[in-house]
Amino acid sequence: MKPAPILAAMAALAATASLSTAPAVAQGENFGKPNKSERACFYASNVRGFDAVQDKVLNVKVGANDVYRMELLGSCPNLDYANGIALMSRNSTFICAGLDATIVYDGPNGPQRCQISQISKLTAAEAKALPRDARP
């Protein structure tokens, strides 16, 4: 597991945008049941570690127990050698979907940017089942 320092300047830049309000809960037949299409969101400042699985997949630890799988839009060379990452959000520090954020890290030739295409929160069982070298 690599600790994930978030760059203060990028976090401050993202924090200047306002947070969107949570959608209202629709009442009806499914009231009180979790919505499968509901997105699992997190604050970029809560990222505690990461591990690059491939050049297109990144597992990120958020808070004490949550693990998110981030699929990247393209290849991110040398991401597995990065000592730290920054998550730059488009709208706020609240990240819900892939296109909400970009990963920035120091590559051998300077800063590298990788667009996130999809984010999914792993269940506790899925996170525990990750191979040791893929756990954030």
Image (cartoon, rainbow, N blue to C red):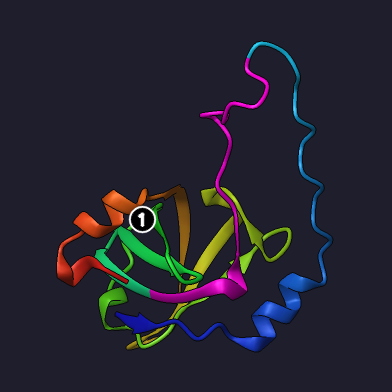
- Residue 98 is left or right of residue 124, and the answer is right
Q: In which quarter of the image is residue 18?
A: bottom right
Q: Is residue 24 left or right of residue 85?
A: right
Q: How many marks?
A: 1
Query: Where the C terminus falls, by quadrant?
Result: bottom left
Tell me the residue that label 1 is attached to. Answer: 74
Is 18 on the left or on the right of 80, as rendered? right
Q: State yes or no: residue 37 in magenta.
A: yes
Q: Where is residue 80 in the image (x, y as percent from the top left)?
A: 26, 76
Instruction: Inspect the image, locate mark 1, and give the three-letter code of the amino acid beneath it.
Output: Gly
Front-lying residue, 133 or 114: 133
Q: Tell me what residue is drawn at x 33 percent, y 83 percent.
A: 2
Q: In this view, does 39 lie above or below 5?
A: above
Q: Residue at x 40, y 66 (%)?
A: 60
Give above or below for 68 relative to 38: below
Quarter occupied by the N terminus: bottom left
Please identify the residue farthest to the top as the structure is shown: 29
Which residue appears at 34% of the width and 63% of the height?
58
Expressed as whole percent of the image width and height from the top left, the position of residue 33 reads: 58, 26
- Is residue 96 rendered magenta in the image? no
- Mark 1: give few (<14), some (14-19) or many (20+) Cα within 10 Å: few
Q: What element carries label 1?
A: loop
Q: In this view, does 55 lie to the left or right of 112?
A: left
Residue at 68% across, 86% down:
9
Magenta stretch bounds? 30-49
Label the magenta part by its dominant secondary structure.
Answer: loop
